[in-house]
Image (cartoon, helix red, strand yellow):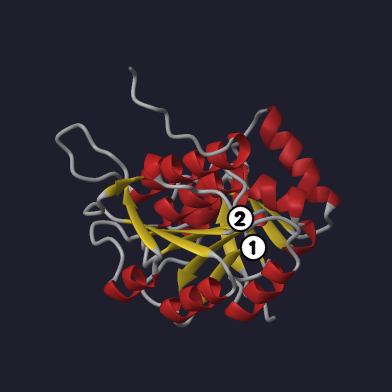
Amino acid sequence: MPTQSRIIHGLHSVRAAVRYDPVHVIEAWLDRQCHGGRWYTLRRQLEALSCPIHVVERRLLDRLTGGSVHQGVAIRFSGEPPRTEADLNALLSGLDQDPLLLVLDQVQDPHNLGACLRTANAAGVQALITPRDRAVGLTPAVHKVAAGAVQHVPLFQVTNLARTLRKLREAGMWLLGMAEQADTTLYEADLSGPLVLVMGAEGTGMRRLTRECCDRLVRIPMLGAVSSLNVSVATGVVLYEAMRQRTQGFTIFPARE
């Protein structure tokens, strides 16, 4: 698969790239005004890679990163781009445990995608799937927010999300979609076994075809005045309930006598 270089910035995301995928670090830029133990340690790690290192003024880093908070470091990185549907089939065939996959339907905010990747890694998700169109990819902001999770949770961008979901169902996976209007709550659903958790986009939720592919719809109970959660927060709630059930078992507590 061809690679495409991109700029990654920030201490967390750059350190993750250096640690987990150092061969794809092409060059680095360091702010000449930066000092401190973490920064010097990272500089030594970059020097050990024998890639070009440019010690520059902060304003050059500001331009290079589009004015983002770069913490004095940026690299050009040529790691793997998002994977394809064919790669997803290969990953699933090589798993030795029940899959837990996360689907984000047209999530466009890089901060939400980065946060979802980070939580997905913590909760044991084997793959994150998004549509190729009208969805954010692996931007520098995603790398920064994910804080290293990009190197652990593969991102698959598919041309036709509904078709991919139908194939996952045909392969024996249970598709559970999150919808505010669902009658069943998250805590009444069995999240064990081969599972695909489907989350909708910011503000609009799942598209109609995506919703129709789900075997069941559930909702996160809401007691306050707000009607919904940010997609990355909702994803965290759902994934940690899935992790709890998959490690401790599914339990519905009986009514108190």
Label 1's element?
strand
Seen from the viewer's position, the closer of residues 182 and 239 is 182
Confirm whether residue 60 shows in the render: no
Q: Which residue is mark 1?
A: 76
Q: Seen in the image, is 56 located left or right of residue 209?
A: right
Residue 16 image position (x, y, % from top left): 68, 48
- Residue for point 29% across, 57% down: 202
* Rendered position, 161 above or below 216: below
Q: Which residue is mark 2?
A: 150
Question: How crowded is the residue under tag 2: few (<14 C-alpha within 10 Å), some, or many (20+)?
Answer: many
* Rendered position, 76 above or below 244: below
Q: Nearer the viewer, mark 1 or mark 2?
A: 2
- Residue for point 31% across, 65% down: 206
Residue 88 image position (x, y, % from top left): 63, 72
Picture quadrant of residue 128 = bottom right
The image quadrant where one finds the C terminus is top left
Question: How crowded is the residue under tag 1: few (<14 C-alpha within 10 Å), some, or many (20+)?
Answer: some
What amino acid is at disc 2?
Val
What amino acid is at disc 1?
Arg
- Residue for point 48% across, 50% down: 116
Q: Seen in the image, is 60 located left or right of residue 257?
A: right
Seen from the viewer's position, the closer of residues 185 and 149 is 185
Q: Are marks 1 and 2 in contact (CB under 8 Å)?
A: no
Label 2's element?
helix
Confirm whether residue 9 shows in the render: yes
Residue 119 image position (x, y, % from top left): 52, 44
